[in-house]
Image (cartoon, rainbow, N blue to C red):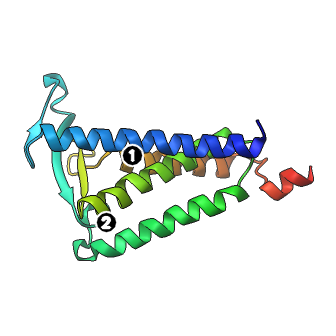
Amino acid sequence: MKPRRFRDLAVFGVALVVLAADQMSKYWVRNSLVLGVPYNPIPWLRPVLSLTYVTNTGASFGLFPQLGRLYTLIALAVIAFIVFFYRHLPLRSWLVQISLGMQLGGAIGNNLVDRLWHGWVIDFIDLNFWPLQEWPVFNLADSSVVVGTCILAYYLLLDSSVTTVEDDERA
């Protein structure tokens, strides 16, 4: 398989897995949990983690809920940016491919699908340990975007062999 096709498959495959996991988990939450009521399937985890079904019309942390439609447009712009510009990042790095796939899947699942289907984002992961006792409830897509961004930042900051596709083609 050609390197570009493998890269495309890696990025879009990871994005599809993230999107599927995110949407399946939210389907379960909508059909199994009561809005706003914490659920603790493993009692000894209660001080650390609960599942609490909440909806969010705003941005991260529920900020600016009146701008809900704007977030859909922002999501489209972010998705377009990732899809069209990922080709300029290193061809050889599987870390970059995974990180972009995680960001793409999270952006599609959280910021696009949820807002188009429901008008809000479904959140349910509720961390309760120090220092996160007042941390907002989030979901798998949020986690995927954050982890994917951290992986990309790690790679770009610490890998001295970062090259672009054009550099790879010249070599």
Q: Position of residue 49 (x, y in %)?
A: 21, 35
46 lies left or right of 129: left
Q: Amino acid at mark 2?
A: Ala
Work out whether residue 135 can be spotted: no
Secondary structure type for disc 1: helix
Q: Which residue is tagged 2? A: 59
Q: Position of residue 120 (x, y in %)?
A: 24, 61
Q: Nearer the viewer, residue 97 or 83?
A: 83
Between marks 1 and 2, how big is the CA–CA gap?
14 Å
Q: Position of residue 81 (x, y in %)?
A: 57, 65
Establish if 21 lies above or below 105: above
Question: Around disc 2, counting alpha carbons within 10 Å, would you say few (fewer than 14), some (14 to 19), or many (20 or more)?
Answer: some
Q: Position of residue 46 (x, y in %)?
A: 15, 31
Q: Which residue is tagged 1? A: 143
In percent of the image, x 65 and y 51: which residue is there?
157
Question: Around disc 1, counting alpha carbons within 10 Å, would you say few (fewer than 14), some (14 to 19), or many (20 or more)?
Answer: some
Q: Nearer the viewer, residue 145 or 118?
A: 118
72 lies left or right of 87: left
Establish if 165 lies above or below 32: below
Q: Amino acid at mark 1?
A: Ser
Secondary structure type for disc 2: loop
In percent of the image, x 26 and y 44: which residue is there?
26
In percent of the image, x 49 and y 69: which residue is there?
77
